[in-house]
Structure formats: C-alpha cells, structure tokens
Image (cartoon, helix red, strand yellow):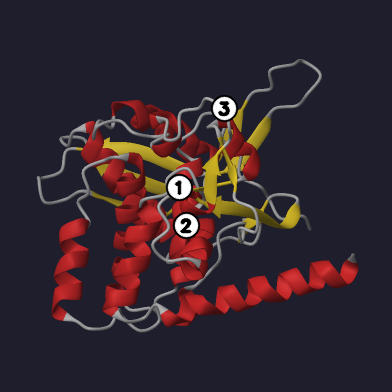
Amino acid sequence: MGEERAHRMQEIDKLYMEVHEFRTKENFTGLVNFVKRFPHMAPYNAMLVYVQKPGSRFVATPDEWRIYGRQPKKGARPLVILQMFGPVGFVYELEDTEEIPGAEGNLFPEGLLHPFRTEGNGEFYIHILKDNLRREGIGYREENYGSSQAGALHRNDDGGTFVFPSKTPKVKEKVVPHDFDMVVNRNHDDTTKCATIFHELGHYFAGHLGGYPDNKHVADRRSEYLTVGQKEFEAETICYLVCERVGIKNPSAEYLHGYLDRNDMIPKGISIDTILKATGKIERMLKSGYPLREMKKE
C-alpha cells in the first residue's frame, strides 16, 4: 500500500512539473481558458485535468456521474486529481462515460456547471466578501475616489484585532490580527467592487505584500524581487479567472488579451502554481462559513 501511494505521489509530482511548460502565449491562454470552464472544480485540479487530457468538456467522479445517469465505460482511463485527506482522487471525462441502462438523470444541471453564476451581479457576493475579509484579518472601507481609481491593499502596521464573539458561553471569543487594509471606490457598482476585491486579494494571496509569521496560507514572495509588471500580471490573471468562473463581467480580460497580443511569452518569474492556488482561495471567500484565518503554531 505504501509503495502504491508513493508511486501515485511521483506521478503527481510529474504533473506538477508540467506547470512550467505553460510559458508560451498559446499554452498559457489554453490553460487559463480551460480552468475558467470548470467552476465546479478547484482551479489546481482543473490544471491537472488539462495536463492529462486537454479538450476535456466535463469531468466528475463515478459517484457524481451515477447521479446524472452515467457511469465510466469499461476500461476507461481515470484522470488523477488531488483530494482532501488523501493523496489523490479519480475523475472521468464525459466521453469516457456512458448512460446507465434504464437510469434517468440530468447530465448537465445548471447548478453543477455554474455554482456561482449571478449574471454579472455582484450584490450577492459583496456582503459575504466584506465579512470574510475581516475573518482573514483584512479591514475594508470605501472612499470617494475618481472613476479611474478602483482600490488598493496596504499592510496595517498600527496593530489591532478583529474580535469574533463565541456563540456559546463556555467558549472564549476569538481574535484575528488586523494585518491589512483594503480600500475600494465607493462610487463603483457592486460588481466592479467585487472585481476590485478579487484583484487586491490576488496580490494578497500571491504574497506580493508579504506575509506574517503567524499566517499559515500566505507566502512571502517579496524576496523573489517581482517587478510591478509581474505582480500585476499575476493579480490580473487571478482576477480574470475568478470573475470568469463566477460569471462576473471581467475587467481583466482586456489587460490580459492586450498583453498577450503584444508578446509571445508571458512575463518571466510568473508562478502559475501561485495563480491557481490564489484563485481557489478567493473562491472559498465567496461562501458563508469562511473559517477564521489559521495561525501557525509556535
């Protein structure tokens, strides 16, 4: 059993290394367009599916396929993805499945294909985001900016905490350090505000502003000496992916298309691994029940 698990992890490592091949404009664009089409799947897992089987239309586990009246074909080859509490999981692409005789099912329910779809309306997300920013240790406020100023994210060196009262008397209240402040243009509509938050969170989760010793899931990448252009490319790509996957009109599309039209390669030093992981982290902030920021243990 141990040897089998080790072998699987070696295969995952090989797939992980494939990320470095997506440096050309064509390969990068193909990867980004593929990931945005699979909002029901974690961005990193969508990348793994793309590496193994480009052109996949829809993938699901055997149990999920049975719900929709389908099953893997005999001898079909599964695709490997990462899963919680285990090294790997397996999914099957649409063409590798067949209808279960006598079964009834809806192959492509709208809720599965577009779990966040809002027709470009950010009213639903903005309130959840504001609350979850505090749970991540990020203050939020809106200012009367001009139309060309969307927002910004800054480190907060003044100290302070966000306090979250306990729901039961026997449990102590919890606190999260107030490490960052986000400012957004109050004159923009809710959808534009959401896109601005996505962009600034892209900088945050990509480690452009650095981390703190007790912050468990934000790396400090300032030592990598990324240029302003490199940071903006990563943040715009993250924003683009999140917007596309939740159905929000995308302000980053023009930026990315303009850059790729002028260049054959994406900027050096860009971390696609970071982009995909940051996209997934922002998507988790679009749901209620976002956990308080995890602290590193001493």
Q: Quadrant of residue 219?
A: bottom right
Image-based side of 30 in relation to 155, left or right = left
Q: Give the residue at x 24% y 36%.
A: 191
Disc 3 element: loop
Disc 1 element: helix
The disc labelled 1 sits on which kind of residue?
Ile
Pointers 2 and 1 in contact (C-beta within 8 Å): yes
Precedes in sequence: disc 3 or disc 1 = 3
Residue wearing tag 3:
103
76 or 102: nearer the viewer: 102
Query: In this rendering, does residue 123 appear at all?
Result: yes
Disc 2 element: helix
Circle 3 Cα neighbour tier, 10 Å, few/some/many (<14 / 14–19 / ≥20): few
The disc labelled 3 sits on which kind of residue?
Ala
Circle 2 Cα neighbour tier, 10 Å, few/some/many (<14 / 14–19 / ≥20): many
Mark 3 → mark 2, Cα distance in angstroms: 39 Å
Pointers 3 and 2 in contact (C-beta within 8 Å): no
Report how many numbered discs are placed on residues in the image.
3
Q: Give the residue at x 77% y 74%.
A: 7
Q: Give the residue at x 39% y 34%.
A: 116
Q: Give the residue at x 38% y 30%.
A: 110
Precedes in sequence: disc 3 or disc 2 = 3
Q: Is residue 137 above or below residue 169?
A: below
Residue wearing tag 2:
278
Image-based side of 246 in relation to 3, left or right = left
**Residue that protrudes farthest toward the top in the picture:** 169
- Closest to the camera, between mark 3 and mark 2, is 3
Residue 174 percent across, percent down from the top left: 68, 33
The disc labelled 2 sits on which kind of residue?
Ala
Q: Is residue 24 above or below residue 84?
A: below
Residue wearing tag 1:
282
